Image (cartoon, rainbow, N blue to C red):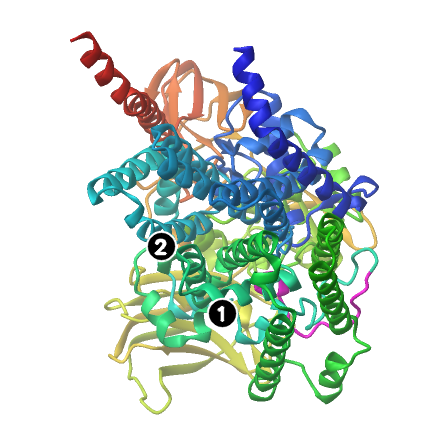
Amino acid sequence: MYTKLRHFYQAYNRDVVVIMLYAVISCLMYFNMFNSSGFLAPGDGIVSYVPLKKFYAEALHNLHIPLWNSNLSLGMPFLADVQTSVFYPPNLIYAILPFNTAYNFSFLLCLTLAGSFTYLYLRSIKLSRRAAFVGGLAFMFSAAINGRKGQVTIRDAVIWLPLILYYYEMLINKRKKIYLVLMSLAFAVQFFAGFTQVSFYTAMVLGVYFLFSLKRYPNMKQWLLDKINFLFIAIGLIAIQLLPTIFLTRYVGRESIIYEFFAGFSLPLKSLITFFFPYFYGNDTPYVPYPIYKNQNIFSDNWSFGVYVGLITAIMALILIFTKVKSSRKVLIWTTIMVVSLVLALGDSFPLINKIMYHVPLYNAFRVSARFNFAFDLAIAVLFAMQIHRILEKPERVIKLKKYILYTSGIILVWAIATAGVYILCPPDGMNKDIIVSNFSLKNSSIIIPIVLLIVYNLILFVYLKIKRKAIIQIVFSVVLLLDLHSYSFYYANAFQTDKNETIAKEVRDLIKPDERAWAVFDRYVGNGDFGGMIPNRNMFYGISSINGYATFLSNDYKSLLGFDERGVNIQSPVLLSNNYILSALNVKYIIANNDKEDLINNSSFFDVDNRIEVANISNKKIEYIEEAGYGIHQEIVKLRPNNYYNISFRLKENSSKNLYVDFAGENYIGDAQQLKVSNTESNTYSQIFHFGSNIPKEVYIRIVSLDKSPLLVDQLTVEMLPKLENTAPSYENIFQDENYTIYKNNHSLDKFYAVQNTVNSDDLKGDLYSTNLLTTAIVGDYPQRSNMNLPSIKLLEYSDGYGKAEIESKDAASFVVFSEQYYPGWKASIDGKETAIHKVNGLTQGIEVPAGKHTIEFSYEPKEFKLAIYILLFTLIYIFVYVNFDKVRFNKKSKS
């Protein structure tokens, strides 16, 4: 054993040194990591990933798999959301280091792995250590990784492609099955990193690479068997994440995306200038340390569009393509990958190709095609390393100084002319003559730094060709390359985030109980603004459960019934605030709002739904489509009182095939917050409550707008004012206020477990939800309508993520008990240990019937798809064992015979 270890060390010790060197360089390149407070989490990082990682870290310390997260949006699956990265092995760093340190150092670990994996791949294709080393540097500090500091799952996923290719090369070269298993495992780890789109794009790159490798196999049968086994093992390994994710996406009803959404955030042609001048359009995060790039940012969302891999990296790669693409198979492979990935990343810049790709299954499920830039950056890094390898082998033959200068000058000149042409034909938004002059000026650091680097590179190569002691020049070249890469990576989004104002979050944390919810009211997107520490998802950081959140997967019922979107915003918040029945039934105990909502909240009350006042009634109306206008419209004047609530309900004689809208308009008034959009997939009966403030004009038109070319037949539309109940106790109590925000206590909030007196059915869930007293009545679709049911005593025994337990005592008769956690398949309920049926309550939560007597009820989240995935994983592991050892077993049988 010792001998084997010694041989292994002797064979790979230099490779280990290189990997350690990558780790040291990562720390040096981001030296400010060690004296900064907060999180390296710009953009989505601080809003989404930091809270989710915090939740995950706590689960690791408690030694359990986090299946459910009760802190966001009435509770939601945690593991099933692929972006939580529950099974991503490098995330074990959160079990070792303090959370703040682990989160920031995970980025340094990502860089180290990116360089190491690229180095291993380049060594496997017979490049020298020195060439492989600089190739690893180029990829680990490329825009594809360093431009994603806040998008943790993307940056973690893209680094695994070179390792997958490394194991594939080892499989071909050594014909050992273990390498196919390791290749499948590397792909699985990439998938576990949490960004399915990157894994799909990786599969496309592998498809190209596999096709080029066909001639390296003895026969097509063996080639095909390897691909089948790779696919089978990889799917089996990722099933533990894939099945819950598929189930989640189907349940929440995510629809196929339209072409405009699919084409959004394509890589614009004008961004290709960043291939040589990464900050040509400015730096959209000027608050980074040592801001050397101060030119005005004129190109929003640079993070999506960076393609920088180093100046000399790009030039060397292009020279290799021009000189060797026809004679070298390796160069041809990576040139093909580079071109294909660039064309696909450009997306809508090539409309014909993009529209064809829109009809490709699975590919059309993803937007932001610019994310394909990671394959482009890797291709450039590999081609660069190949060229360096050729220079190190025979510098006099490989490169002639005059030819190199000619190539370099030609490339830069063509690029400059092309960019100038793009500026003239399609100037970026906001660009004027002064900005153009400023951006092309030699006083601009984003122009002068690349030019200086180009001159230095030329000097290094000139000296390298003239002197014999080349090792020193090689070291100098590596240092200049690092400075080149540092000039981009360090200065982009290198900003540490923290809550500037935690006052509100800390106050709520001290007030709220684990089984209660809060709601920070947002009627617009606040990004990573502070909001007293209560921006969506940041509530998790303080141990606060919230009714809203920043989440990728939200059910259609949650969005349509409550009005929330994926960013935690609710433009209909006035209606929800005023309808205390809904908030109380959803266990919302504390509300945090801007001080400008003080009057609205203080004046809110319960609706007197039994004494509605009808103000408009439209019946038997036929709306014809107007070809010239592109829509059909009917409008009538309605009399509305300021500062009141109105219920709009209407019924169609038959469903519309297109979306239609009901809204209100008047002189200098268009009520965006009072617009009812009806999807063509919904039923033919609709209703919604709107709040009208003090700014409505005297004459207001209600408008019905149809996009359907066929006549729209409206059976009936009514507008009813909802009076407030008199002599009711205030719904909300002001318990804390500063100069910006107020915390209100909901005096009617129901407990996590509560019972109702009545159960009703509904044909119009949304309308009934806003017009029913949910304190005493539950809307249950698959349960008999009952009234005056028994109200038992309820004692909460235990509540945690994915689990609730209570003691129910009812002496006289059965009762209906509601558990205010989101209804989702996978929840199980039991009474005294015996499973019972769960009913969907109010379209959102869960409820069960409990018989008379004293009972213990339990709710637990135990998804069947996760259990099935575990069985698939076990079967896959057995298959891997048989697959790897099959030849050995067969060989041993032959030996015995």
Q: Find numbered disc 2 in the image and state the secondary structure of the residue it sits on.
A: helix
Q: 223 or 105: nearer the eye?
A: 223
For the point 55% across and 67% down, the residue is: 319
Q: 113 or 351: nearer the eye?
A: 113
Q: Which residue sits furthest bottom?
A: 628
Instruction: Give the x, y percent position of residue 441.
Output: 77, 81
Q: Amino acid at mark 2?
A: Val
For the point 63% across and 25% down, the residue is: 95
Task: Judge whether residue 524 can be spotted in this image.
Answer: no
Instruction: Give the x, y percent position of residue 741.
Output: 76, 52
773 displayed left or right of 204: right
Q: Which mark is residue 322?
A: 1
Determine which quarter of the picture holds residue 751: top right
Q: 735 or 452: nearer the eye?
A: 452
Magenta range: 291-306
Determine which quarter of the picture holds residue 277: bottom right
Give above or below for 471 relative to 688.
above
5 within the magenta span: no
Instruction: Give the x, y percent position of residue 787.
Output: 37, 35
Which is closer to the viewer, label 1 or label 2? Answer: 1
302 within the magenta span: yes
Secondary structure mainly formed by the magenta segment:
loop
Q: Find numbered disc 1 in the image and state the secondary structure of the residue it sits on.
A: helix
Residue pointed to by mark 2: 208
Q: 236 or 781: nearer the eye?
A: 236
Q: Earlier in the sequence, mark 1 or mark 2?
A: 2
Give above or below for 659 relative to 520.
below
For the point 61% across and 58% down, the residue is: 395
Task: Judge whether residue 645 can be spotted in this image.
Answer: yes
